[in-house]
Structures are given as structure tokens and as C-alpha cells.
Image (tube, grey):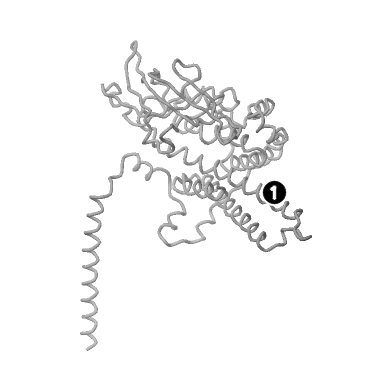
Amino acid sequence: MQRGTVSAIRAVGGLKLVQKRTVFGLAYNLAKKVVPRVSDTEQAALECGTVGFDRELFSGKTSLSSLGKYRAVLTAKEQAFLGNEVEQLCEMLDDYQIGIDQDLPPEAWKFLKEKKFFGMMIPEDQGGLGFSAHAHSMVDAKVNTRSPAAGVCVAVPNSLGPGELLMSYGTEEQKKYWLPRLADGREVPCFGLTGPSSGSDAASMPDHGEVVMRDGKLGIVASFNKRYITLAPIASVVGLAFKLSDPNGLLKGNGKEGITLALIPKGHPGLETGPRHDVLSIAFMNGTVKGKDVFIPIDYLIGGQKQAGFGWNMLMECLSEGRGISLPASAVSAGQIACVGVGAYARVRKQFKVPIAELEGVQEKLADIARETYTMTAGQYLMNAMLLNHEKPSVLSAVMKQLCILTVA
């Protein structure tokens, strides 16, 4: 009797399994026909970077023990910089006056360059400070609490500019020439990715270039129209992203068609930077980068000719790290300012002869601010620790970016 019951149960279970496989199989095949195929750029974005403890999050088997390997600490040199040079910079910054002038004071710009704030991530043997991602993040957050405009000016050269791309992909000649100049402020960089109709989705940008031979020299004729480019009005060198085509096969297998990155000095024939944008009345420099039929020598490509067509992968690897540092740092600083400012005001502002900080409704909102700030700070430290652990958390950096922007908004 028992055997018969067991056999019946097994039979029913097997039938249900067959039904499941049949139904889901049909649904999967239908979905494959309806859903667009993953493009090459999307595939590259999915495959770039590394996977850390987030593997457990998405597998549903989360273990806090895996977080034990992550620690974000400053070296003695980094701590000294934060306590001295960063404090000195903050003393120079009057955010109210910066808003009126729509620019940082000249002495602040001079100090930023002399003290190598633009070269925090560049190795010491290349003229930079050789700081860690955690130090970069702490400096950004501190400066942002004094002046968001100054914070952006510090963040961009270290995380969203050509420096990181050069360190990872530049030729030895490019590194030797550009990195020391970027580190000591002789060169101020910007990076042209965003356009009027495309942002971080570089695959949709219309900017294009074609490989040509001109006067016996291999190069690219490119047309581009970039907008909202931070530091563009004062940049002396422009990083540029565009789609490359090679209809005549001039690359000859050394490089390929696709998104490509170039580094172009200011004053190059046809390159235009400006005019300045007034973005939300915030004082950091922001403007356009334009050019029509601009001839770009092939050795201006970041990494040289062999990196032609690999720009998307380069962006995904490098800029994802940058957004995981600078954007959370600025969001954390906003949360800290809110905690201090709103908390202090709630103690001195009285209603019915009682500080409004004693009212439960206000306390609830103060608790919300503190909770969100603590959450962002925890995420900031975790992201920094993952980078210190030589991971490249492309997916989590995107999550952090979205979380912090939505929280601050």
C-alpha cells in the first residue's frame, strides 16, 4: 500500500516537472523571439568588472562573514593630507561668495594645483600623490561639505577624467607625458561623453569619426557635439568619446571599428570648448565640446591605434570605479550637512516654548535623515574597501550611484 502511494506521488511529481519544463520552455522560446538581442555594448557592460560579495546577494545565499575581508582605512600620509591640506583648502572656500562669483577664488585654484589635488590617484612615480580610492572619497566628501562646486572640481580629474584611462590603457609615451602634467595642474582635463541626446549610454551617441590617410599620416576625421562637460571651459586637454568607422580598412587589423577614446590638447585645429552652462546655478565649470571634421592623429587615441574600437570596455572598467567613489562621496556630504544643519536648527527653533526637536513629528524626520546618511556612509565605506581589495564592482557602483542620487533628491 505504501509503495503504491509513493509511486503515485512520484508519478504526479514527475508529471508536474514535465509540465513545468514544457510551459517554461515554451515561454522562454517565445521571450527570445520578442525581447531584443543583447548588443555588443550591452554584453561588454555585463561582462566588465569583477564580482565580489554581491555574488551571494544575487544567489540568495547571503553571508555576513564574507564582508570581513573588506576594510577601508587611511594611511598616515593620507590622514595627514586630510587634516592639513584639505583643511587649508576648506578655509579658502566661501560657498556663498563662490555662488555669487560663479567660480572658485584664484587662490583656491592655485592651491588645488600646487598641492596636487588633481593628481590624488596618479602614482607617485608619475608625479601624483598615489592615494587610495578611500582617501579620494574622504577628500571629496570633506571638500563637498564646504563647497559642492569645489568638490566637483576635485572629483572630476581624479575619477571621471582622462587620468584613470591613461593609467590603465595609455601607452608608455602618453603616461610619461600626460600624467605628471595632470598631477601638478599644468594640465586641467575634462572628458567629453555626454551629448544633447545621450548621456551615460555611450552606445547611443551620434558623434562619429572615420579613419583616413591625410598627407601620408594615418588619422581620424571626427565630428562631435558634447554638452554638460564638467571643467570644459577651463580644460587644457579634452578626453573625447566617439564612434569610429573604418570603411577603407586602413586599420588593417590593428584596432577595430566601434566606440573610441582620444585625448586632444586645447588649441588643436577645429576643437572648440565653451560656452559655459549655468547648471542649476552651481558654480563649477561646465560647458560644451564641439568640432566638425576635426583631424585627430592616430597617436592621440588613448592607448594608441590598438585600442581603437575598445572605448566602451575602457569606459565601463574605469568610469564605473570613478562613479562609485565621487558620487557617493558627494551624496554622503549632503547627508552630513543635513544632519548638522537641520539638527542644530531643530534645537534652537522653538514652537510653544519648546524646541521643535522635541516634537515627535520632527524627530521622525530627523531620524530619517540620520538613517539615510548612515546607510549612504556604510555603502561608501564598503565600495571604497572593495576597490582597496582590487575589485572592480561595476554593477554595485551603478547601484550606489542610483541609491545616492535618489536618496539625496
Determine whether 204 is above or below 216 in the image.
Answer: below
- Percent of width and height locating residue 114: 65, 26
Determine whether 38 is above or below 174 in the image.
Answer: below
- Front-most of 259 and 175? 259
Which residue is the extreme one toward the top? Answer: 215
- Percent of width and height locating residue 302: 43, 27
Residue drawn at x 36%, y 30% as measured from the top left: 206
Q: Under tag 1, what secondary structure?
A: helix
Which residue is the extreme one toward the front? Answer: 352
Quadrant hosting residue 78: top right
Which residue is the extreme one toward the right? Answer: 353
- Percent of width and height locating residue 85: 69, 35
- Front-most of 43 and 404? 404
**Side (left or right) of 212 relative to 147:** left
Quadrant hosting residue 61: bottom left
- Residue designated by label 1: 341
**Side (left or right) of 16 relative to 243:** left
